[in-house]
Image (cartoon, grey):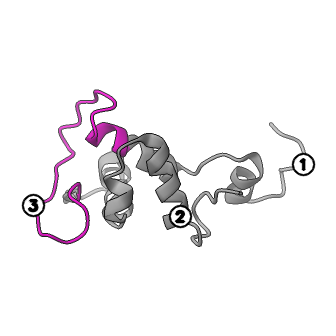
Amino acid sequence: MVTGLKDKSYQKRLLILGLPTRERADMQQILKILHKYESVNLDNIELAPNNNRGHKYKLRKQHVKTRFGLNRFTNRIVNNWNSLSSDTAESDSINTFKSWLNNYWENKDSKFTYQH
């Protein structure tokens, strides 16, 4: 527990402490998986057919019938991941990805904002 943060919202606490949100951590994790920086066997992750829109790592969203299924890592990341620019999703390193992600999410209140 950190003193002085009890009355702050979760997002505000993360920002004050300089910690990323779950969404940001999820984006970094899926980049590592798709670019083979980490060896993770996720049978539920499937690339969407190439449709020449957006980046080449777009993911196919699975149809689920429960809230549990919606909150599963492989489902909760799809919309955020697929909305990334080509430059961001196709970054050649983690640091480049973080930089592009900071720029892409700069004005989104619900995301971690890099403080210059």
Q: Measured from the top left, where is residue 74 in percent x and y? A: 30, 48
Q: Of tags 2 and 3, which is closer to the observer?
A: 2
Side of 74 relative to 99 (left or right): left
Q: Say if mark 2 contacts mark 3, CB within 8 Å.
A: no
Which residue position holds label 2? 103
What's under tag 3, amino acid-wise? Pro
Q: Nearer the viewer, residue 34 or 21?
A: 34
Residue name at image x 42 percent, y 50 percent? 27
Side of 113 relative to 80 (left or right): right
Residue name at image x 57 percent, y 51 percent? 21
Which residue position holds label 1? 4
Mark 1: give few (<14), some (14-19) or many (20+) Cα within 10 Å: few
Q: Is residue 70 visible?
A: no
Tell me the distance, in whole angstroms, between the alpha carbons under discs 2 and 3: 27 Å
Mark 3 or mark 1, earlier in chain:
1
Mark 2 or mark 1, earlier in chain:
1
Q: Measured from the top left, where is residue 93 in percent x and y? A: 40, 41
Q: Of tags 3 and 1, which is closer to the observer?
A: 3
The label number, if any, that marks residue 15 in the structure image:
none
Q: Say if mark 3 contacts mark 1, CB within 8 Å.
A: no
Side of 84 relative to 50 (left or right): right
The secondary element bearing badge 1 is classed as: loop
Q: Nearer the viewer, residue 108 or 44?
A: 108
Mark 2 or mark 3, earlier in chain:
3
Residue name at image x 57 percent, y 70 percent? 108
Tell me the distance, in whole angstroms, between the alpha carbons under discs 2 and 1: 30 Å
Q: Which residues are magenta?
A: 30-58
Q: Quadrant of the N terminus?
A: top right
Magenta segment includes 101: no
What's under tag 2, amino acid-wise? Asn
The label number, if any, that marks residue 49 in the structure image:
3
What's under tag 1, amino acid-wise? Gly
